[in-house]
Amino acid sequence: MKTVFVAGAGRMGAGIAQVAAGAGHEVILYDLTQELANGGLKAIDKSLQRATDRGHVTSQEADGILQRITTTADLSRAEPADFVLEAIIEDLSAKKELFGELDGICREDVILATNTSSLSVTDMAEATSRPHRFIGIHFMNPVPVMQLVELVRGLKTCDEAFAAGEELVRGMGKKPVAVRDLPGFVVNRLLIPMINEAVACLDQRLASAEDIDRAMSLGANHPLGPLALGDMIGLDVVLAIMRTLHEGFGEDRYRPHPLLVKMVESGQLGRKTGVGFYDYWG
Ligand SMILES: NC(=O)c1ccc[n+]([C@@H]2O[C@H](COP(=O)([O-])OP(=O)(O)OC[C@H]3O[C@@H](n4cnc5c(N)ncnc54)[C@H](O)[C@@H]3O)[C@@H](O)[C@H]2O)c1
């Protein structure tokens, strides 16, 4: 049993706290205010309720998971942590500021990990005095359901820290793949340009949105077509990752399609705003 400090109690942080407590660890779930942290715990409660209704966990197990999670808005509670798993907003300066503060609070032997989807793990690690104990642990959304975790080795990450991260996520029932610290890692590097290309197909009227998605569902066995997937991820997130790939590699093939940019500028972000490539009001 380890003490896991989860920073950020949003969608990903709540999921990470749930699977960490599910693996038997003591979890401290932190956010900017006590209310936000409690909101994360409420989301976990709901998620466990659904899992209980479906027979995936017993109500006793769900109670145990909830009991192992405490919430806080006090960063100094990270002091006894064996692991810090950071899942705050995708903003490099906010993440660096947080890790800088944690560096002054945490034990010498803590493992510091970020759940960033696209930012440089190596750069973030430099906000601390111990970049060798810093790794990327990139969970997929929704965390309790998705098996994959990308384990990211920064330029200075030591073998011991990487192995500790691997052991932690395997204990959570996840299947890790080891990746180097390059923009988009594996999943987003392949998935997001595919969505961007589907936007180009739509813009060229190659086929309707429905037919582009149907083609990839029936022809490539994708559970969701690329445009519907973009709507689910959020087109603002898709655009941000395309920009990271474009800036990171400087290659034209990663240029965000103008229609994707316009969709985001006009607030058509997909499911979360009710409109994207499809209409979700109905
Ligand atoms: N949503 C996804 O599909 C997904 C998938 C993989 C990785 N990620 C990554 O996970 C991270 C979190 O994403 P999310 O979707 O959970 O975001 P979210 O907006 O749902 O949650 C972010 C949380 O962080 C809190 N926060 C912001 N600044 C903070 C600070 N300085 N200290 C403490 N808490 C702070 C916010 O109050 C909020 O509760 C991001 O880095 C994102 O790129 C997201």
Image: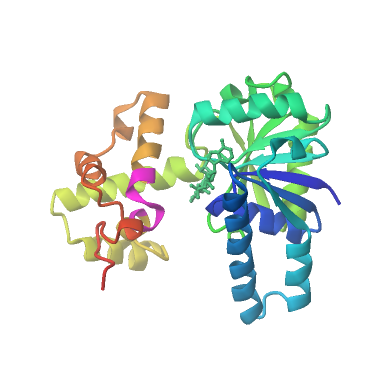
231 or 27, which is in the foreground? 27
- In the rendered view, tell whether residue 118 sits above or below residue 277: above
- In the rendered view, tell whether residue 272 sits above or below residue 62: above
Which residue: 30% across, 51% down? 269
36 or 276, which is in the foreground? 36
Number of marks in picture: 0
Which residue: 43% across, 44% down? 190
Residue 276: x and y in percent read 26, 56
Which residue is most to the left?
205
Which residue is most to the right?
1
Is residue 133 left or right of 239 when viewed as pictured? right
Residue 242: x and y in percent read 36, 37
Is residue 94 left or right of 30 when viewed as pictured? left
Is residue 144 left or right of 141 when viewed as pictured? right
Residue 81: x and y in percent read 80, 40
Which residue: 53% across, 54% down? 11
Q: Quadrant of the rendered structure where residue 123 is?
A: top right
Magenta segment main secondary structure: helix
**What residue range appears in magenta?**
230-237
Camera sees residue 121: no
Which residue: 58% across, 59% down? 146
Is residue 264 left or right of 174 when viewed as pictured? left
Magenta stretch: includes residue 126: no
The colour scheme applied to this rendered structure is: rainbow
Camera sees residue 245: yes
Q: Quadrant of the rendered structure where residue 56 is?
A: bottom right
Residue 106: x and y in percent read 78, 31
**Which part of the image, by quadrant, shows the C terminus?**
bottom left
